[in-house]
Image (cartoon, rainbow, N blue to C red):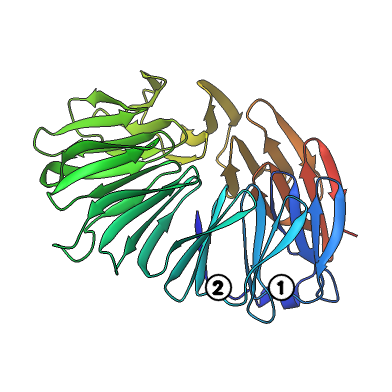
């Protein structure tokens, strides 16, 4: 998820700067016009470069030259508001505020969530906010609003965090609770809570009272380790961690497996993929399988969904789609970006291509 509040002055200087997801893209041409690439179809949607923008799996969002918020979704350009204070773009939801008023755009529909939201948190499928008029901690999920906690006595929530489809918060009684699939479940007393991480369908946490490691996974409580791991991070339905013995492990599908008995040089998780380095080998973990991508660690790589884009030792641009690796450019690539399942890369003098689903699209 990304809180978008930055000015993209470089768009005025560079031709062809793009962002996209799941087969869509947008860019500015030499005249500053905004063009959207939507599954083989390209059309102009604005005649001036945006002040700021964000991209999700299903939408392009930008603030136009006059300060209005625009959302391109399902082949249609929506005028969301005449002004915007801030906005968060995730793969499925777009949340935005107009002063204190909070709204959400969900699959083509706008909803007003709150007239006075002091704070809000948003992810792919869930929005949590603090209503400072009603003194309530509220939640939006699956088209409905839910009350999480009455925080009149405390003034505002002390802790809130959101995963892709799950949220946790400390209530007025000091308990850490999880909101998941329309239900609230008590997790742990907050004074016993150590480190915590959230993903999709999972919350991983440390119980400092026992020095142990646990997960709340698909409405079930799971004991993962008797000792606190060195590090851990959650993805889509799994948690990856380095245990007390320095082994790299993954818990997924109610099973724990050791990925490497050697301590990894690094590991990184995004969506449904983990990349990691062991003894200078660059590897990936996807859907229960381990892939060796290279016998060196790339200086630059990007991961998203279940894929990886990176430059090999010859400077060639490669793409791992979660199953196989292929070289998608032998040009001297000056920059590349992976968003969703598409790779945008620049080369030569203001030349730029988009690689998506086995095809290369030229920006000319």
Tag of residue 346? none
Find residue 112 and report its horizontal and vertical position in percent. 49, 61
Looking at the image, which residue sits at the far left? 209
Disc 1 from disc 2: Cα separation:
12 Å
Q: Is mark 2 on a helix, strand or loop?
A: loop
Q: In this view, does 234 lie above or below 145?
A: above
Q: Pick the residue in front: 219 or 134.
A: 134
Q: Mark 1 sits on what residue? A: 11
Residue 65, compared with residue 333, is above or below; it is below
Callout 1: SS:
helix
**Residue 13 screen position, x and y as percent:** 74, 77
Quadrant of the frame with the C terminus: bottom right
Residue 16 visible in the shown view: no
Residue 334, horizontal then vertical, whole percent: 73, 58
Q: In this view, does 328 lie to the left or right of 264?
A: right
Q: Which residue lies furthest to the right in this view?
A: 364
Circle 2 sits on which residue? 6
- From the viewer's side, name the closer residue of 37 and 67: 67
Residue 164 found in image quarter: top left
Residue 178 horizontal side relative to residue 52, left or right: left
Q: Which residue is drawn at 45% across and 70% down?
A: 101
As drawn, is 17 to the left or to the right of 177? right
The answer to which of marks 1 and 2 sits earlier in the sequence is 2
Residue 297: % across, % down: 55, 40
Vertical order, 101 against 199 (above or below): below
Residue occupying image coordinates x 50% and y 21%: 288
């Amino acid at each position: 998820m990304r809180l978008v509040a930055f000015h993209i002055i470089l768009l005025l200087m560079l031709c062809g700067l793009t962002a996209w997801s799941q087969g869509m893209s947008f860019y500015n041409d030499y005249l500053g016009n905004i063009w959207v690439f939507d599954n083989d179809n390209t059309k102009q949607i604005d005649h001036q470069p945006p002040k700021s923008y964000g991209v999700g799996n299903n939408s392009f969002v930008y603030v136009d030259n006059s300060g209005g918020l625009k959302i391109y979704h399902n082949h249609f350009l929506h005028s969301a508001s005449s002004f915007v204070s801030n906005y968060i773009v995730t793969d499925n939801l777009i949340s935005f505020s107009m002063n204190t008023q909070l709204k959400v755009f969900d699959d083509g529909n706008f909803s007003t969530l709150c007239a006075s939201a002091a704070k809000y948190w948003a992810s792919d499928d869930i929005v949590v906010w603090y209503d400072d008029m009603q003194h309530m901690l509220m939640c939006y999920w699956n088209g409905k609003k839910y009350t999480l906690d009455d925080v009149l006595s405390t003034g505002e929530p002390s802790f809130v965090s959101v995963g892709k489809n799950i949220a946790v918060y400390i209530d007025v009684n000091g308990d850490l609770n999880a909101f998941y699939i329309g239900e609230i479940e008590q997790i742990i007393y907050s004074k016993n809570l150590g480190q915590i991480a959230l993903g999709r369908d999972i919350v991983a946490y440390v119980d400092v009272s026992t020095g142990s490691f646990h997960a709340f996974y698909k409405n079930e409580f799971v004991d993962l380790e008797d000792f606190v791991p060195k590090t851990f991070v959650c993805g889509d339905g799994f948690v990856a961690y380095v245990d007390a013995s320095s082994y790299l492990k993954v818990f997924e599908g109610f099973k724990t497996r050791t990925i490497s008995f050697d301590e990894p040089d690094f590991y990184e998780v995004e969506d449904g993929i983990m990349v990691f380095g062991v003894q200078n080998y660059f590897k990936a973990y996807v859907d229960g399988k381990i892939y060796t991508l290279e016998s060196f660690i790339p200086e630059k790589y990007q991961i998203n969904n279940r894929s990886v884009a990176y430059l090999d030792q010859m400077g060639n641009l490669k793409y791992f789609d979660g199953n196989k690796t292929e070289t998608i450019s032998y040009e001297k690539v000056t920059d590349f970006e992976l968003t969703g399942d598409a790779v945008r890369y620049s080369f030569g003098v203001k030349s730029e291509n988009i690689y998506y689903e086995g095809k290369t699209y030229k920006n000319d």
